[in-house]
Structures are given as structure tokens and as C-alpha cells.
Image: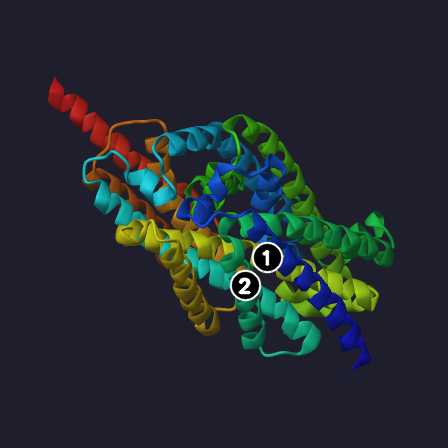
Amino acid sequence: MINQAVIAVTFIAFLGLFTLVGIYSATQKQNTTADYLLASRNVNPWLTALSAMATGQSGLLFIGQVGFAYKIGISAIWLTIGWALGDYIAWWLFFKQLRQVSEQTSSETVSSFLGHNTLGARWITIISALITIAFLGSYAAAQLVAGSKALNVVFGWNYYWGIILGTAIVVIYCFSGGIRASIWTDAVQAVIMIASLLLLLIVGIISSGGLGAIWTKLAAIDATLVNLNPPNLPLGFLPFFIGWVVAGFGVVGQPHIMVRAMAIDSADNLAFARNIQATAGLIGSFSAIGVGLAARVLLPDLINGGDPELALPFLSLELLPLVFVGMMLAGLFSATMSTADSQILSCSAALTQDIFPQFAKSYKLAKLGTLTVTMIVLIIALAGENNVFTLVTFSWSALASALGPLLIVRLCQRPINAPLAITMMAVGILTALIWNLVLNWSNVVYEVLPGMAAGTLVYLFVQVLRQNGKK
């Protein structure tokens, strides 16, 4: 009982810090929808970078990625490398252009940008907004589930209580300062996330007897755990790796991350923010993989009848002083909240700015939209699937496949109309769904690759037909 009290005090102290940062950000706010949704396009590049890292990594880092490394071993590194490479390429090619063009067109959401100055723009905006709400809402729910998993391990709480606690905290600081509160708290949370993972990684390596001992013990458990080539790849390594590169590139279809490019203070600062974000992301991801490998050595029984996605909280309880368990729990919980708050705000913007534009200039209705979306996400989280890795990767792929190709076409300022844009979104998302749910080929190539390729091919096919029709 005393142990739990010490952990709880530390945990609550960190949550209090995050909430206070969010509330303090309200001192900088203006009561306008532009400030609520884009922080008046005046966000510092450091905050942009750390916020994007925290939002992109999410509960997938602490729960899903640690569990993934626990199960398949050192070959989990290719997911991290591929994803980071694709993400970096997307930032390099498109984020600066998005910042410039979104300001020129006065677009405050990704959906409004997709439909701007296009024949049939209203339909493009509405459908892309509905896709955003459907899949980003599910994505946000997965974050709340991830946080509740950790609280269940440490305090024995029912999953429902962790989900409700996370939801309440997100509502408090989102209501206080909108996207600015989200970005400021995300930046603080990113620092806690990295520090807590590095701490557990170092302690885990020492407790295992060093890096060499971890390698030897993993090989003794199962030789495939120390094989750099992932097991059971029907098409071989290259398609598998390219699939994860394209998965990282799929950031172009993630409104909750793209909006950070739209909110930075200057397009010229995006290169600096990109490098900071990539560095912080790689440190976090490699640390998570190391923690997963150490957990496989120190907690081998989780693979039989346990939940490998709970490796991190169990390892924290096993190795860390109680105060640091509270810090680790806060790091994990903050990872989930840093993504959930951004996704809820993006869904809220899609609802109040894109689907119901008559509410677009009402600051109060924008906040009401946030509350409405939060309640929907809460219901999904309470009723949904508990596998965080599956929920997150599927939601990411659906958004990337539906919105990514269209966003690239719009950023390249290529001609498009509503029927073609809607067809691209529909074909992209259906391809990803069939690839994952019907064909079950996601373990061969992650479905972002075929999904984005299908949407892109639709556009190219129509352009070829048009060119031939002019001859």
C-alpha cells in the first residue's frame, strides 16, 4: 500500500506539471478560432519538433513498440529505421510547402486545404473530414487504452478508470489553450518520455549483465531473437523494409502531425525542427527496442499467457526505485496524452470548421466541438479493442492511404476535381482495408504501401486518359 502511494504521488506530480503547463499556455492565447486551432501560426521550432515527436511516437512507443521488440527481437530495429527514414523524407519534401501554401490560402485545417479552390471543394472537405474523425478518433482511443494498461499493472485499476483519467486531463488543458496547450504540454512530455526510457534502458542493461549478456541470453531463449532478418517474410526483407519506409512517409496523411507544420512560426524554421524531431524520435525508438529486449531476458514468462505490451510497466516495477516508477508511468501516460490531445483537436477542427462551416468563426463552438469529439473518443476507448499496436498501425495506415496521395497532389499544385479526389481517397482506404482485413498480408508488406500506391495510381491513370483524350 505504501509502495503504491509513493508511485501515485510521483505520478500525480508529473500529471500536475503537464496540466499546469497547458493551463499556463492560456495566458498567451487569443479568443479566436485561428489561435485555438493553429496558435496564430507562431510556434517556436523547438516546441514544434518536440511536440511532433511526442505526438508521432505516442503509446505505440511505450506499449506497442516495446511489446513488438519483446516478441520478435532485434529485427524490430528495421521498423524503427524504415519509419524514421520515410518520416524524414516526408518532412523534407512537403512540410515547408504545406506551411507556405496553407497560410496563403488561409486554411486552418488539413481538410480545408485539400478542398481549397477546387471544383467540388465542399465534398472533398466533408469526406476528408469524416475520414479524419473516424480514424483519428479510433487512433486517439488507442492512446487512452495504452495509458490505462499501464495504470492497470501498477495500481490494479480497471482499464476504464485509466481511460477516464486520461480523457479528463486532456479536456482540461485543451480547453485552456487549444493547440498551443497541446504543443506546449507535448514538448514537456517529450522530454519526460525520452528521459524515462533512457533511464529504464540503462538500468535494464546493467541488470541483465551488459549488452553482451543480453545478446547471449536472447540467443539461448530463441535464436531468431538475435537474427537481424525478421522471421516469416514470404517476399523477403526488401518489400518488408520498403513497406515500413512508406509507413513513415505516411505522416503526410496524419492531420494531427501536419497541423504542426501549419502552426510553426516560419516555413524557414522547418528544416531545423525536422532535424530535432528526427533525432529525438530515434533516441526514443531505439531506447524502446532496448527496453523490450531487456524485458525479454528479465521477464521471459510474459510471452506465455501474459501480455508483452505490458513489458515496460512490469520491468519498471521490477527494477526501478518507486519514485522512478512514478516517473516512468508518467512518461508512458504522457506519451498517450500527447497524441490523444492532438488527435482530438484535429477531429474537433474537422467537425466545426469543415463539416459545419457555419460554426467556423465561433470560438465557443470550436471548444464545444472539442468536448463532443472527446466524448466520442471516450466511448470508443471504453468499448474498443485492447491491442494498442494493432489499433495504432491500422488507423495510421487508413489515414495515410486516404489522405496522403491527395495531399501530395494538392501540394504539388496539380489539377484535380471532386470526383477524382473522392475516388483517390476511397480507393486508397479500401485497398488498405482489404490488404489488412481480407487478404491478411500486413505481415508481408505494411498496408500503407499498397494503400498509398493505389490512390496515386488512380490519379496517374486519370491524367493519362485526359492526355490521350486531347490527342
Q: Nearer the viewer, mark 1 or mark 2?
A: 1
Packing grade of label 2 (10 A; few <14, some 14-19, many >=20) is: some
Identify the residue under disc 1. 23
Packing grade of label 1 (10 A; few <14, some 14-19, many >=20) is: many
Q: Is residue 203 visible?
A: yes
> Does 170 sit above or below residue 102?
below
434 with respect to 143 (left or right): left
Protein image colouring: rainbow
What label sits on residue 69 in the rendered view?
none
Mark 1 / mark 2, whichever is N-terminal: 1
> Callout 2, which amino acid?
Ile
> Does 314 sit above or below residue 402?
below
Identify the residue under disc 2. 172
> Does 290 sit above or below residue 112?
below
Dots 1, 2 in contact, CB < 8 A: yes
| Front in this rendered view, residue 72 or 244 | 244
Residue 174, given in percent of the width and then of the height, sits at 51, 57
Label 1 and label 2: CA atoms lie apart by 8 Å
Q: Is residue 65 visible?
A: no
Under circle 2, the secondary element is helix
Residue 221, given in percent of the width and then of the height, sits at 74, 60
Q: Residue furthest bottom?
A: 1
Under circle 1, the secondary element is helix
Residue 81, given in percent of the width and then of the height, sits at 61, 39
- Please give the name of the residue rendered at 30% of the width and 49% of the height, measured from the top-left corner: 354
In the picture, the quarter occupied by the C terminus is top left
464 with respect to 193 (left or right): left
Residue 395, given in percent of the width and then of the height, sits at 44, 54
- Please give the name of the residue rendered at 28% of the width and 39% of the height, measured from the top-left corner: 115
